[in-house]
Image (tube, rainbow, N blue to C red):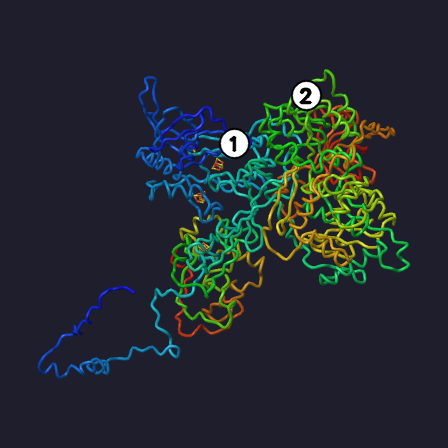
Amino acid sequence: MTDHTEEPPEAFTSNLPHPGGIGGVFVPVAGFGVTLRSFFRPTVTEQYPTTPANIQPRYHGRHQLNRYADGLEKCIGCELCAWACPADAIYVEGDSNTPDAQFSPGERYGRVYQINYLRCIFCGLCIEACPTRALTMNNEFELAGPTRAGLIYEKQDLLAPLEEGMLAAPHPMVEGTTDDDYYKGDVIRATEAQRAWVRANRPDDETLPENLPTREGHVPDARHGETGTPTPLGAKRFVSGTGGGV
Amino acid sequence: MSATADKVPTTTDLVTVMIDGLETHVEKGTLIIRAAEQVGIEIPRFCDHPALEPVAACRQCLVEVASPGPDGNLRAFPKPQPSCSMPVTEGMVVKTQYTSEEADRAQKGVMELLLINHPLDCPICDKGGECPLQNQAMSHGWDESRFVDTKRVFEKPLLLSSEILLDRERCIMCQRCTRFSQEIAGDAFIDLQNRGAMQQIGTFNEDVLGFDGYGPVGAAAEDESGNAFSSYYSGNTIQICPVGALTSAAYRFRSRPFDLVSSPGISEHDSSGSALRTDHRHGKILRRLADNDPVVNEDWITDKDRFAFTWQNQADRITQPLVRKDGELVEASWPEALAAAAAGLTAAIGKTGTPADSKAKGVGVLPGGRVTMEDAYAYSKFARLVLGTNDVDARTRCSSDEEQAFLGATVAGTGLGVTFAELEKAPTVLLVGFEPEDEGGVVFLRLKKSAGRQSVITVASHLTRGAQKLGATLVPTVPGHEARVLASLKGTNATYKELRQPGAVIVVGERAAGSAGTLTAVGALAKRTKAKVAWIPRRAGERGAVEAGALPGLLPGGRDAAAAAARGAVATAWGTSSLPQTPGRDADAVIAAAAAKALDALVIGGVDDSDLTGDLLKAVKTAKFTVSLEVRRTAVADAADVVLPVAPPSEKSGTFVNWEGRLRAFGTAIRTDAMSDHRVLDLLARQMGTDLGTATVDAVNAELASLGAAPAGHRPTVPAEPAPAASQKSTNVAGEMVLASWHQLVDEGALQDGEPHLAGTGRVAVARVSPATAQRLGLHGVVTVTGKRRGSIDLPLAVTEGMVDDVVWVPTKSPGSWVAHQLGVHPGQTVVVKGAAA
Ligand code: SF4
Ligand code: SF4
Ligand code: SF4
Ligand code: FES
């Protein structure tokens, strides 16, 4: 038992202004003024999912692994994104590029790349950590699914779609260039020699000009095993092949 | 300032110094940087390494120093001084970066300078995350660089060897690698080259290195004389490089330190029992590093310890028991496989209770030399208690009864004998049948440490480059004649006199067993000279097998299986009335017996048939029943009737006993459901109705402890007189010679499978003969060596100065030279050497 003395309860005093006179009469219904004003304004309620969501251009959505303009991957498998991630959502394993399998310019590439969307908190620290601007975030936010495993996105799920002039990796670097030339943005499209290499090694590769689907501008969906699924509802796909690092 | 534990600190010469206002008393001659460590002050450093001589190359450790002048007044040095190379003096006052602005500014300036040409490609650098340069740039560097010009670039990486890659841009010229190579390994293949900004580490170019026949197999950077970086210890340079300039092909770009789980371990590759750190991720080993164990391996391990770990996870790893059904090995459940194994073995020992029992001829057990002491004990107990036989032998190499008596009398259960420290301090070391660099691993480094202070004498056919690095003297000996040579060491013989110095050590290798009388002669010589004897076998499990009694004539603790009292003692401990009395057969005899249908069944552990001169595969096929306890689908497992998978060392715990007799216990690094041999044998015994009591490591160790070492009367006795060495009978075949051979450290041993980068650093196989022999037989170019198995080996000839005549040396299991398998002979036996028909 403590022996503190009970203080008398404080009397309630309102902080609201107390308009007097005629104003005082309307006080109880003043709130309806807001309602009435809004009544004559345009509607802003979004009818998502029946109509596309209106997403801000810098919204932090799903990650994307970008490519250089010739299709080589930007990721060097450095694991800095995994290191930066406060939620431990990213798992990377690097490996060495070889002459037969060059995935990114230079010596090192990301062989395994996974993001667990059950863990990711979309803070964007990973994309700040990425030294090559390989990792950016796009506007896709519909990341739900029926299975846990399905929400671990693999490298092929995250890779940016191939754009005009790009060739699917692996293929050699542009003749006579170094990784520095790529970083500086001096490589602007795949060359004939690269196409010849892919032709010799993977004649059926879909990104060779002769194998491109006829529909103009069609971008093959990189999502593994989900080709043909319609673009997710709403999300305006922020397709960025060059990722801003160039 | 080495990390050797046997250094007794002398407390007599203490000096008083003041570091950052803290007064401390340290031994005279202590370097400032160490004195600061003792009071908990860390000075940044790169080139300083406690095991290497100071060079003050990087200048990162600058501090302000003042010491009393002749007049007693404190006088400051005009400029900051490197604390890693300046010893403390009485009354010295040191101000580090914490109390001196000048020291701090100097350190930051050095850091900025080091980073000027540094590529800072941390994202693709293997050192990133554990890089002293990264860390110290953060803790002791400026946030911004003022350098805006183009950095110097080098082509990268440079292949120093097929395993060691050098990114010269990242190098900060600390010279740890070159100092290690020169001081510790004695392989001075890299050194500083050029000046100024173009200064770089490169392969050393000096003709003095006489390189004949010691070149590596794989691609490596060459200097002008065609020499390549070739060292059995080169991996240590990667570990001590304070930046990511030196990397290994095996680990390059594979991982980051924060991905890895580190587990301490013990190397399974040699009998030194080097302490390792195994770094693994998701159950897969990514790399192994040296752990500091001052009494054993200090800071170093061999490249084999470091890089040879892929063997256990090859595609042929066995994960499920296999049982032969209709001639095919098919996967089976554990209960089914154990039942099949038990049934086959029960029939072979005649315990089925049917008339066929009278024809049963018994079982032979070959545990192999790579199992832990606990496993060896289980094999020994299983053979004697369950199978009722003494036919158990872990020595799957050339061996003899004389060796067994020697091991029982002087090695088993004797505890810690000669130690690494004693070896290092010994005034004289006599090597008999032992090649430290190839067969000893870190033993070589200890001897190298004392090179110049110690006299090393080797009884061998020729002086190898390794022996030359130790400054060894050769006692030229034809293999097989060691006993005679050792017996001649007496009276006024110089070697004999050297060996009489207190502390002298005679090192005898496992090869001595192949030369009759050698071990007895070693014993006699030790008695004459009072030198200590160290038996250094090659394989990690050999000493443990001797301790555990996995030899036909030895019971645990060095007890003689032929002595009734010793048998009785063990029988009581094992809760049985008696142990088998029939003398056991050794490995060769077991194989011969099985091939001749004198044994019905075999139980085989990790034995590679290509290591044996006897035809093990034929024996397995002839025997009615074979149980193989294996990690991988070897040829033996493929021919067996029941295959029980066992765990490789990284997936189990246990104890290797190193050659010193030191117990090197290790825990499980990677938890899988694979079981160790002792546990599998326990299950098998249970299936056969006996409780072996070897289910856990603890249970085995408790039993071994309660058995203890044999009392004097229970040990075998060594023959008193050296048996006469078998004289070489000449059959007058032209080109007949005595074979000398041993395993090179990096070769084609089964535990080095799956690591091509390491294999590339192994030395090329050559056949060595003396100049006189080469001339007499007109040998040049490629020669053909033919053995009794009528197989032959073609090798390039290396004429070796100072070698004994009429002897040919070839490596035991190097590429293109598998002596046991292809020639079917042991060293000391004769082969025929001819010029290859070209
Ligand atoms: S995405 Fe960027 S940060 Fe992550 S591993 Fe690849 S290169 Fe490194
Ligand atoms: S050595 Fe490697 S990790 Fe260390 S600072 Fe240089 S590039 Fe970065
Ligand atoms: S390679 Fe490494 S250890 Fe050798 S000098 Fe350069 S920084 Fe030092
Ligand atoms: S650590 Fe002292 S100069 Fe390098």
Q: Chain of mark 1?
A: B
- SS assignment at label 1: loop
The tag on residue B75 is none
Query: Cβ(mark 2) to ligand 3 < 8 Å?
Result: no
Residue B835 visible somewhere in the drawing: no
Find the residue positioned furthest to the top.
Answer: B492
> Residue B684, relative to residue B120: is it above or below?
below
* Distance in Å between CA atoms under marks 1 and 2: 28 Å
Q: Which residue is mark 1?
A: B2
- SS assignment at label 2: loop
Q: Nearer the viewer, residue B232 or A200?
A: B232
| Amino acid type, residue under disc 1 in the picture | Ser
Residue B794 visible somewhere in the drawing: yes
Quadrant of the drawing holding the C terminus of chain B: top right
Picture coordinates of residue B438 (x, y %)? 66, 35
| Amino acid type, residue under disc 2 in the picture | Arg
Crowd around label 1: few <14 · some 14–19 · many ≥20 (10 Å): few
Q: Nearer the viewer, mark 1 or mark 2?
A: 2
> Residue B525, relative to residue A210: is it above or below?
above
- Mark 2 or mark 1, which is nearer the start of the sequence? 1
Q: Nearer the viewer, residue B664 or A165?
A: B664
Q: Which residue is mark 2?
A: B500
Crowd around label 2: few <14 · some 14–19 · many ≥20 (10 Å): some
Picture coordinates of residue B699 (x, y %)? 67, 50
Residue B267 shown left or right of residue B348 in the figure: left
Picture coordinates of residue B572 (x, y %)? 76, 47
Q: Nearer the viewer, residue A214 or B346?
A: B346
Q: Nearer the viewer, residue B710 or B84?
A: B710
